[in-house]
Amino acid sequence: MDRRRPFAVEISGSAISGKLHWPHLRDEAGPAAVVLLCNGLLAVNKKTEVLCARIIESLTQAGLAVAEYSARRSDLPVQSNHQHSTAQMIDDASAVFRWLMLRDELDLTRVGVLGYSFGAIVAACLARRTDQIARLCLLAPVPAAVVLSAAQRTDGSALLTALGLEGVTEGFFTDLGSLDPMHDAAVHDRPTLILHGAADDDVPPELSFAYSDAIELADHEAQHTLVAHADHFFEDDPSRTACLAQVSDFFGAMRDGSNPKNGT
């Protein structure tokens, strides 16, 4: 059986394409637990693609299904990046999430969301829209205000490139100032894991504390961990192995059918 199942989700006269990766081995019968992966990519970024492939492999090896998808684009020349806005990216994630909730082969009570880098903004804003996300993981998250500031500075291109946002049209950033992903992540109380590379030179690790601080201010709990020697892409071992192990353990609680508050 092919463990990669292509899917398409219709939205606003267009479609979002993706793949549902089925677990390698399952030690349970019935619907599977699944993780929705939001990588936030709008441009080709090989380092992010490699990391996400490793995350998918680690989670499926751990007995979890994983859904990944490509950002919807407008009907304009393919050589340019024409994603309309961050709000549209959140709508896309929401549409895929709803599609997962309707699948008979998936357990709607065990749907997790993982947002990486700029995708953490998408995942956090999605987390406000529904209380049906069982577990939320933000990996190397960046605050929206930091991205907006980089887009307005002449020296901000390096950060945008690291986030996979080089080449986007100016209008893409228009709604970033109205988003509050830190607050959004804190609206519903659910197990939340925030992981960041301690040696991240692209998105300094102290920035991710804005997310955990907001969650704790809401009287919810978040596990915040800095991975020693890890850069933004968790490129080298043993930091990548440590990152993948923590992500798999965190979502593995869904696979086991248990979901204790912020336990791993």
Image: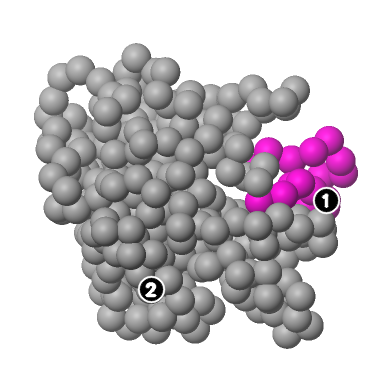
- Which mark, by number, is residue 209? 2
User: Which residue sits at x=51%, y=49%?
Assistant: 125
User: Which residue sits at x=48%, y=39%?
Assistant: 129
- Of labels 1 and 2, earlier in sequence is 1
Main secondary structure type of the part rendered in magenta: loop
Residue that badge 1 annotates: 79
Q: Is residue 260 left or right of residue 87?
A: left
Q: Which residue is nearer to you in this view: 172 or 79?
A: 172
Task: Confirm whether residue 194 shows in the render.
Answer: no
User: Which residue sits at x=51%, y=57%?
Assistant: 181
Within-10-Å neighbours for mark 2: few <14, some 14–19, many 20+? some
Write down the region rendered in magenta: 70-86
Question: Residue 82 magenta-drawn?
Answer: yes
Snapshot quadrant of residue 152: bottom right
Residue 43 in the image: x percent, y percent? 68, 56
Q: Residue furthest top?
A: 104
Mark 1 falls on what kind of element? loop
